[in-house]
Image: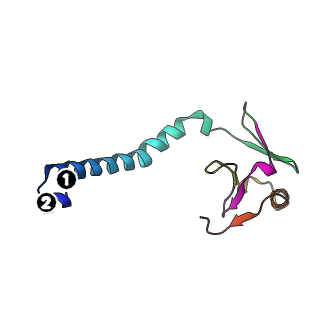
Amino acid sequence: MILYTQNPSVILLGISITLVLTMGMSIVMRTLLLPKILSADTRYNKEFEYLFDAEGINFSPEKDASVMTWGSFTRVWENQSYYLLFHGPQEYWFVAKQSFEDAAQEHKFRAYVSDHRKIVSGVIW
């Protein structure tokens, strides 16, 4: 709309209206629709069990199971609440810190991970 007041071109008016509508639709999609879609999908509402040992980690929901060796993770990040185990440029698994039974179990997990990858914490880029 700003462009139109400075230059009375119908093409610029059309571009600015399209841009505003596209931005509005994007905001509605990300804030309203996508969370509802994901919460209704049963794949994202399952309980997961993490089984880890010196060889790797096993993530298993009810029927599906995924086993990965520690070496297959490209990097490991940590924040206050989670460990993020990356196995691709934008693909990762996360392990909630509250899921550990006690500090000893978390320490063992950190030891297994640290044998293969450095755990990066703090501000992550």
Residue toward you, 125 or 98: 125
Q: Residue furthest top?
A: 63
- Residue 67 in the image: x percent, y percent? 78, 40
- Residue 51 in the image: x percent, y percent? 81, 45
Q: Is residue 73 left or right of residue 89?
A: right
Q: Relative to 90, say whether 102 is above or below.
A: below
Q: State the image quarter where residue 79 is shown.
A: bottom right
Q: In percent of the image, x 61 and y 35: which residue is there?
A: 43
Disc 1 secondary structure class: helix
Q: Amino acid at mark 1?
A: Leu
On the image, numbered disc 1 is attached to which residue? Answer: 12
Disc 2 secondary structure class: loop
On the image, numbered disc 2 is attached to which residue? Answer: 7
Q: In percent of the image, x 19 and y 53: which residue is there?
A: 12
Q: Relative to 110, say whether 65 is above or below.
A: above
Q: Which residue range is magenta in the image? A: 66-84
Q: Quadrant of the N terminus?
A: bottom left
Q: State the image quarter where residue 82 is shown.
A: bottom right
Residue toward you, 28 or 22: 22
Residue toward you, 86 or 47: 86
- Residue 74 in the image: x percent, y percent? 72, 54
- What whole-number distance in Å separates the C-alpha atoms at marks 1 and 2? 8 Å
Is label 1 in contact with label 2 (beta carbons under 8 Å)?
Answer: yes
Q: Residue furthest bottom?
A: 122
How packed mark 2 is, by other alpha carbons closer than 10 Å (few <14, some 14-19, many 20 or more), is: few
Question: How was the colour assigned to the protein in this rendering?
Answer: rainbow
Q: Amino acid at mark 2?
A: Asn
